[in-house]
Image: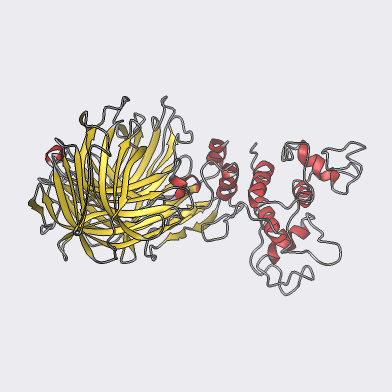
Amino acid sequence: MRKRYLIIFSLVLFFGVLEISSQAYTLLPYDNFSGIYIDKAKWLEGESVIEIDAGNQKLRSEVASISPIGITIYPQVDVNRLNFVTPIYVNSFQADVTILESSITNSASATARLEGVFYNDGTSGAGIIGDIFAMVAIGRETNGGLVGEVIIGRLTNAEGTTWNVLWYQTFSLSVAIGIPYTLYLAYDSTANQFTFRVGGEEKRVGPGDIPARIAEAKAPFRGLTTVVYVENATSSGYVSATFDNVYKNGIPYDDFSTTTIDPARWMNYEFVREISGGKFRSKVRSSSASSSFINGVDFVNPCSLNGFQVKFTPVAYENLSSGTAWADAIIGGWFYHDGTPGGGLTGDVMAKVSIGGPGKSPIAFWLVYRFDDETGWNFTDLGYGQFTTPISLGTTYTLSLGWDGRQITFKLNNEVATYIPTGTIDPPNRQWKGISTLVYQPNGSEATIEALFDDVMVSGFFDIPCGDWALNYIMAIYEAGITTGYGDGRYGPEDYVTREQMAVFITRALNQVPADGYCGTTNPFTDVPYNRWSCKNIKRLYELGITTGYGDGRFGPTDLVTREQMAVFLTRALNQASADGYCGTTNPFTDVAYNRWSCKNIKRLYELGITTGYGDGRFGPDDDVTRAQMAAFLSRAFLGME
């Protein structure tokens, strides 16, 4: 169904507008990042920062819970961690920790921690079941208060995403925002004993309170961490903290006086996702222990977006890999499936516009490739091209990407390139569109990409979730030029249709939209002034014989359209209105009597395949029509969809 209408109706991304069925629609504003935090009504991800604050010479770490739209199982834990190299040799560590901000809603916690996985208690099972973790933390707990606390627990599934708490206590000292506290965590493997401190207060937990040590941990680590934990979809959290003066085994280890994270001491490196100065800032860095990774924000509802545009400013670029690693800032998406058999991402086709590359200096290019396995990290290039515009750090560029069901269009400023697929074009297995920075296959090389994104604009709608029953219908009437939504990126699928909106839908579907000023200075109905925005559509609907109004001189432009009124509008618009008595003595639906005034229209609509009713024998003639339902009716009536 989707493939069919995408072939019929097209949109072409060109010079900041979308050309759709002879009509031009300007890209609609989506996000200018003017808020303090990432807007999780628009993006799936929240803040995640780990980098050295060069001005204060401290490690800055922050994390926020992701959008509930992206969560399938609760509780959800979002973690930002700086891990020690060779963790099994870290017997004790401490750091000065300052909470800069910690906020929660409902059932959540937001804390800064020293934590690690220290040993395995012999619990049988796959993966890392039985690994024992411990942490000392400060931050905001589910009761809303700021606390210092200790937690010891056992991992209970192979992936380490579930656990049992074995021991928990809070410290008696008061914790305040902006005050540094020295946190200390030690484990004595011989005595099987933990020691925890916050400030001058100490707690020891030994064999009487924790399981026996049977073996080394299956997945050992020690690290400096910020964590947000949420229990349900109504909960959220955010924490920002600094770490300083780290000691390892009683010896000074790192005071973060360098400008970048030291790969001789730590296993991971700079990673920034935040709002900064009214722009979205994204940064990644690879070094000796890095593998491929990506950092960005994903559109909450990508399925109903056919194109998008961003203002992009490269801030930093370094690639010391001698051409083996790619460090890119991108806008991209998964747009179609090429028929390659397999699960996951196999066969899905990605397209992107990028600035970065494998060389010493950044370039601008476009790329199309097919995923060859479920993970998406192995792929085959299908198309590639380089833009001629030179790239300079600090310069702002406009990047655009669009898909019309048969052609992908890429744009950098005024340079345009296209890619036309050959062969199968099916909907992708999975849906994604977003903006990000990434390092691909660094293989231990130093590479850094940092960028600012701003003024995101989209074509399509961002209030229609993937999987929504009406998605294909709504996108079909959008691409056919029958609707532009509310003009702010919303379609409003659950809103009800007014009679003037119905007039607009039908005149557009019939290609009968008059020019502005069509009403002159005459009111076509007593309640429709000549200068009303919808006057031209209502007047034309009347001239076409599709409406006569209420029969008393009124049209009722803001009244809601009922399902039987909709049946009348559509059968008249299709020149399929039936004669009186068309229903005979048979009721077409259990709630539509054969002698009801609208029966002939409802019966004819059913015969034309435009409606099947509610599926339980009812039609609901007096029910108001939602905009999602109207999209289905219009798509079936005028676009031949099923």
Q: Quadrant of residue 640?
A: top right
Q: Who's the residue at 48% across and 33% down the image?
A: 426
Q: Quadrant of the N terminus?
A: top right
Taking 428 as reference, is 390 above or below it? below
Please state which of residues 287 and 543 is positioned toward the viewer in this rendering: 287
Left or right of residue 587: residue 334: left
Counting from the top left corner in percent of width and height, residue 604 is at 80, 40
Q: Is residue 638 left or right of residue 283?
A: right
Q: Is residue 440 above or below residue 199?
A: above
Viewer-nearest residue: 77 or 189: 189
Please state if 260 lies on the left or on the right of 504 as rendered.
Answer: left
Task: Answer left or right for 508 relative to 4.
Answer: right
Q: Residue at x 13, y 39 (%)?
A: 86
Q: How is the image coloured?
A: secondary structure
Q: Nearer the viewer, residue 83 or 292?
A: 83
Residue furthest toward the front? 208
User: Quarter of the image holding residue 392?
Assistant: bottom left
Q: Is residue 507 visible?
A: yes
Q: Is residue 313 visible?
A: no
Q: Position of residue 522 (x, y in %)?
A: 75, 73
| Residue 224 spot, x, y in % from top left | 22, 50
Residue drawn at x 41%, y 57% as measured from the top left: 143
Instruction: Count numbered badges in the picture.
Output: 0
Q: Which residue is farthest left?
A: 251
Report the residue at 26% width, 66% height from top.
178
Say which quadrant the C terminus sits in. top right
Where's residue 483, x and y in %? 60, 54
Residue 579, above or below 181? above
